[in-house]
Amino acid sequence: MEIKQVLKDLCLSYGVSGDEQQACNVALNYLKPYAKDIQIDNFNNLIAVISEAKNDKPTILLDAHIDQIGMIITAIDDNGFIKVANCGGNDRRLLLAQDVIVLGKEKINGVISTIPVHTEAKKRVPKIDDVLIDVGMSKEEVQKVVSLGDRVIINSEFNTLNDTIVSCRAVDDRSGVAVILKALDILKDEDLDIGLSVLFSSQEETGEQGATIAGYNINPDIAVAIDVSFAYTPDADEFKCGKMSKGAMIGISPTLNRKETDKIINLAKEKDIPYQLEVMGGSTGTNADTLSLVRGGAKTVLLSIPQKYMHTPIEVVDLKDIENTAKLLAEYIRSFKEEM
């Protein structure tokens, strides 16, 4: 599996929260070779059964969310300008003068309008209600191809910055999807006696609803959430961040299972796989929090890929971190074969 191509295909597919179908279809095609059973449920969760539990072995769920942040169309004004609301945590500082894609009946290019600096007294951060998208059409022309509720994303390309460092939109959390696919590829010729399921979950960015529903139905004994977390940049507090190119960030939090977390840390040491710790005093802000509460509760672990510039169109990761996170995840799954 060529991880760079997988990540590129995933990131350039469309899947704003609540409208994840295209991204699910791309991920489904990559998942097919490893799955015994695969489906997209009514909530746009992509769920696959990789193996079924034998001899009282546990069922493990691997989760990464498939949705991305974006905007949802709320109105079309008399001049053909499109108004929007947030779908997830957009950074409003970035919105003015952005190139966008309107995902209507067909894909339409647009730009977010802005007042020229020459005529504005001071710089401002726009409220989402003030954002107007110009697609160069009249109201009547727009209405032929755009409906209220259609999604909008900021446009960006998949760029290679330096060797294994890449940048694109939706790296949060398509890089987590890539980790799981790579781990399955590593394990593809092995006979697993655990129950192993995969969830590429919907609507994480708007409240973790997909994981809530699918987690309940899958009912795992152990859940491993794969997400991204903050990588250090010079304008951030170093102690609050991970480091890019230094491996997976293994989460430690009251909501996470300490025994399984320690097991992963020990495996990383034993197998000489680079890792770092991410300590949180409360909830993690990821699907791990939701999955720990399914039905009677699941033992939950969190692995995060260090990422710069979260929730922007230029999210940056190191492909080596994705590869090493996948290796650690594969070793964790293998470890259950050795347990009696």
Image (cartoon, helix red, strand yellow):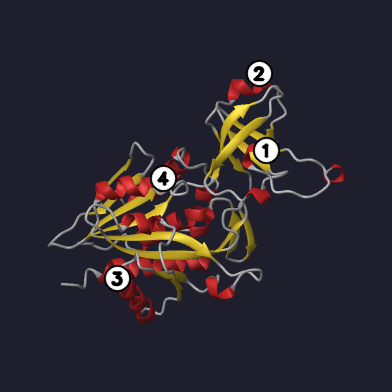
Spot occupied by residue 243 in the image (x, y as percentages of width and height): 55, 72
Tell me the crowding category of disc 3: few under 14, some 14 to 19, or many 20 or more residues within 10 angstroms, Cα based: some
- Disc 2 residue crowd, few under 14, some 14–19, many 20+, Cα 10 Å: few
From mark 4 to mark 2, how far is it between C-alphas? Answer: 33 Å
For badge 2, the amino acid type reads Glu
Q: Nearer the viewer, residue 133 or 179?
A: 133
For mark 4, does the 10 Å Cα neighbourhood hold few (<14), some (14 to 19), or many (20 or more) residues? Answer: many
Q: Earlier in the sequence, mark 3 or mark 1?
A: 1
Q: Position of residue 88 (x, y in %)?
A: 52, 46
Q: Earlier in the sequence, mark 3 or mark 2?
A: 2
* Residue 131 visible in image: no
Q: Which residue is mark 2?
A: 140
Horizontal side, residue 315 vs residue 223: left or right:
right
Helix, strand or loop at mark 3: helix
Quadrant location of the N terminus? bottom left
- Determine the residue located farthest toward the left in the rendered image: 55
Disc 3 target residue = 260
Residue type, mark 3 in image: Glu
| Real-space Cα separation, disc 1 to disc 2, in angstroms | 22 Å
Rendered residue at 79%/40% (across/down): 115
Q: Residue furthest front?
A: 121
- Mark 2 falls on what kind of element? helix
The reply to whether dot 1 and dot 2 touch (C-beta < 8 Å) is: no
Marks 4 and 1: CB-CB under 8 Å? Answer: no
What residue is shown with label 4? 202
- For the point 23% across and 68% down, the residue is 336
The residue type indicated by label 1 comes to Asp
